[in-house]
Image: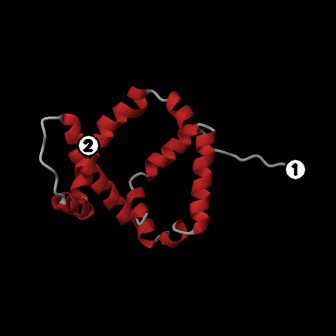
Amino acid sequence: MPEKIEVPPLDEAKSNLEGAVSVIPDRYKKAVQRAKWKDKAASDAAEKNYSDGVTAAAAEKRRQKKIAKLDEEKDWRKPATEVGATRIGPGLRAKLDKWKENVRPYFETLASLELPDRTADPITNVDNRVKAVVKALVDKKKELLGT
């Protein structure tokens, strides 16, 4: 005989979650500290699953459909200004050393460039100077990614 799944009333579930909020950060931290995910995530099987999922989502236009249902003010701007704005500073501050190491090769690449003198023609300057900068940065990124 088929069995039905019994779910609690939504207000009860919300209340239960609210009661657990104070212990969730510590549980989360402990779970992260014991997690071993990298080898599985880097596997060929995981890459295939990721690719299959992205391909299916794009073919079905899931992203586009979900975005169409959103309210820009309620679903994005309000949470971003009320919650995101309070988190972004501490998050950035905690990652300054990592940012420095990640950006270092790009700064070194830019510092090593020798660009031709500027001309009076802005299009020539784009061709001779801007494109050289973009190419150098793209090449560096490909080198770092191993592609």
Q: Secondary structure at mark 2?
A: helix
Q: Is residue 80 left or right of residue 8?
A: left
- Measure the alpha-carbon separation of dots 1 and 2: 73 Å
Q: Quickly name the residue at label 1.
A: 1
Name the residue at 58% across, 55% down: 51
Q: Which mark is residue 35?
A: none
Disc 2 residue type (three-letter): Asp
Report whether residue 23 is seen: no
Dot 2: few (<14), some (14–19), or many (≥20) neighbours within 10 Å? Answer: few
N-terminal of the pair, mark 1 or mark 2, is 1
On the image, which quarter does residue 99 sit in?
A: bottom left
Quarter that holds the C terminus: bottom left
Q: Secondary structure at mark 1?
A: loop
Q: Nearer the viewer, residue 116 or 50?
A: 116
At which x and y percent is residue 50? 57, 56
Name the residue at 58% across, 38% down: 62
At which x and y percent is residue 70? 48, 29
Q: Nearer the viewer, residue 108 or 79?
A: 108
Name the residue at 38% across, 54% down: 22
At which x and y percent is residue 121? 17, 35
Question: Is residue 47 placed above or below 124 in the rendered structure?
Answer: below
Question: Is residue 27 placed above or below 92 in the rendered structure?
Answer: below
Between marks 1 and 2 in the image, the one whose residue lies nearer the viewer: 2
At which x and y percent is residue 16? 50, 48
Report whether residue 76 is seen: yes
Dot 1: few (<14), some (14–19), or many (≥20) neighbours within 10 Å? Answer: few
Q: Which mark is residue 127?
A: 2
Q: Is residue 121 left or right of residue 57?
A: left
Q: Nearer the viewer, residue 127 or 51?
A: 127
Disc 1 residue type (three-letter): Met
